Image (tube, rainbow, N blue to C red):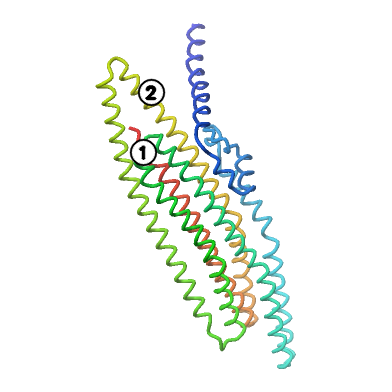
Amino acid sequence: MKRFIITLILLLIIPIFTYADDYENYLESFDTSAFELLEEDTKSFLEESGIDGFSIDSLSSFSLSDVSAFISDRITDSLEAPLRFLLIIIAVSVLTAIIKSADSNRYSEFYAYASSLIITVILCTYITDCINITYSTIKICSDFAYAFFPAFCIIVGVSGGTLTSLSTNTLLLGMAQFINFFCSNFVVPVLNCVLAFGICSAINEEVKTDKISELIKRCLITGLSLISSAFITVLSIRTAVASKADSLGIRSLRFAINTVVPVIGPSVSEGLTSIQMYSGLIKTSVGVVGIVSVIITFLPALIQIILWRLALMLCGLVTDVFEIITISNIIKAFRDVLRICEVLIILTMLTTVISIGILVASRTVS
């Protein structure tokens, strides 16, 4: 009985050690240097979560609490500035109401223009940071995607998805280049133009440039949404077709090995299957860490923008209550710019995450 128990324990333990050793050795043969291009906060999160080494055990124990703690820290770090500005708006609104009640048209009109300019300058300082963080975050994602997708497609190819890798690699690299080109040439100039048009229209109601900024905003959001949807659709179709072709090719190869190679044919076929299974496991682990990395890269910028949008929404309510039209229009102009930043971040993040997810979900070994 004792011998049976010892033998059973050894049979259970030895495959685990063998699997772990083979997995680590096989993982080292692939290039994962793209993760070095991520920002320090993202790399620190991966290290603290224990998933930077692509360990299956660490990925299995990865929980929502790790992300929740990260989000909580970023909210705490980003909350001070929006709250401070909200207090400034409340103070300005109360003071404006007091001046209006004094029934001094000359001073109230001068104060209205002066306060509007001051609020504009203060908001420009803060919102410029949001525009810059939007630009830098998208740029980091573009650089990461440009380095990650070729290496990841190699892993997909080794795991049995040769046609999937070949058919999607060029498309994914094109996406990374488009994001980089759009970020470098359009993001900051377009956002600054929208902001300038909105401020001019808010300060001087006779200048109707807010219609131009509204048109730019709609065209930008609609255009990017259509491009993202079209890209994901084409990628899904290509991956679905190529993965079926890869599956058929693998079955044909295994049949040929079993038929042509005498005696050791089944062993060679099983060895090929084992290699593909290890590669598939590595594909899943690296892909999952890539998805987490992209999300964590975008979260700080997204949190900062959402907090500022909420603060400006409350500021707009305060100014509407006190009927301060000029400041209310200025706040709306900045809120529109933040809306565009939010859409840019969400679309870029979702497009990248879904692209990685499609490759991870593609099944070729059967």
Q: Is residue 330 left or right of residue 250?
A: right
Residue at 50% x, 35% y is: 30
Q: In this view, does 252 lie to the left or right of 225?
A: left
Q: In this view, does 19 lie to the left or right of 252?
A: right
Q: Nearer the viewer, residue 153 or 109?
A: 153
Residue at 48% x, 73% y is: 216
Q: What residue type is labelled 2?
A: Gly
Residue at 48% x, 20% y is: 15
Residue under label 2, please give it: 271
- Tell me the quarter of the picture where residue 120 sits: bottom right
Where does the C terminus fall, quadrant-wise? top left
Q: Which amino acid does label 1 sit on?
A: Thr
Q: How crowded is mark 1: few (under 14 residues within 10 Å), some or many (20 or more)?
A: many
Where residue 57 appears, x then y in whole percent? 54, 32
Q: In this view, does 365 lie above or below 317?
A: above
Q: How far apart are marks 1 and 2 (CA)?
A: 18 Å
Which mark is in front, 1 or 2? 1
User: Do tag 1 and tag 2 residues touch (Cβ < 8 Å)?
Assistant: no
Q: How crowded is mark 2: few (under 14 residues within 10 Å), some or many (20 or more)?
A: few
Residue at disc 1, secondary structure: helix
Where residue 299 appears, x then y in whole percent? 58, 54
Q: Is residue 292 above or below residue 91?
A: above
Q: Which of 263 and 81 is in front in this view?
A: 263
Q: Residue 32 carries which label?
A: none
Q: Which of 1 and 244 is in front in this view?
A: 244
Disc with the residue nearer the chain's start (1 vs 2): 1
Residue at disc 2, secondary structure: helix
Residue under label 1, please give it: 162
Where residue 241 appears, x then y in whole percent? 30, 45
Residue at 61% x, 55% y is: 300
Where residue 160 appears, x then y in whole percent? 37, 35
